Image (cartoon, rainbow, N blue to C red):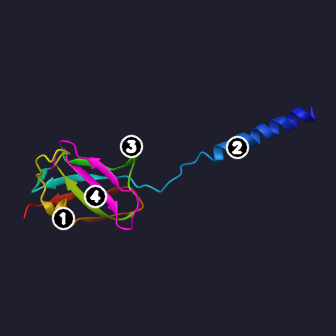
Amino acid sequence: MIERWYFSAVCFLCLALFFCGCKQTGPRLVRVGGVITLDGQPVVDAIIHFTPIDGGRGSYARTDETGRYALQFLPGQPGATPGIHRIFISTADESGGSETVPARYNRKTELTATVNPRDATIDFPLETP
């Protein structure tokens, strides 16, 4: 009888240790989304990158037909790390296709945004020069 109790206790302890080790690892992420417009019109099918100023992995998204985006840290892992980020927005594809966003928002970006440690909506109302 004691052996059975001892075996049950050891099994319970092993399960408890296993589940304690299954918590999420990696950086704390904040869900970030918003709308990107250019001169009041939605920027469709654009790529947006958030790159932490202090270094580390950035986040990315593609806008939909209404200019909405929702950042992904990794595929299936939504969000961005808290802190100040440099922002890059582009409509050019990998083959160097048409860029409709002014250079000051992509290759010569002037944009930054702060991701606060809670869910965030960050809109980008861009304007042509």
Residue for point 58% across, 48% down = 23
Q: Say which label, 4 or 2, has the lower sequence index.
A: 2
The dot on residue 87 is: none
The dot on residue 108 is: 1
Given residues 115 and 46, the one toward you in this image is 46
The spot of residue 42 in percent (x, y) is: 15, 49
Q: Residues within 10 Å of mark 4 (few under 14, many from 20)?
A: some
What is the span of residues highlighted in magenta in the rendered image? 43-65
**Circle 4 or circle 1, nearest the eye:** 1
Element under disc 1: loop
Given residues 109 and 72, the one toward you in this image is 109
The dot on residue 122 is: 4
Residue type at mark 3: give it.
Answer: Pro
Q: Residues within 10 Å of mark 2 (few under 14, many from 20)?
A: few
The dot on residue 75 is: 3
Q: Answer left or right for 33 relative to 103.
A: right
Question: Which quarter of the picture shows residue 40?
Answer: bottom left
Q: Residues within 10 Å of mark 1 (few under 14, many from 20)?
A: few
User: Mark 2 = which residue?
Assistant: 16
Q: Answer left or right for 24 relative to 95.
A: right
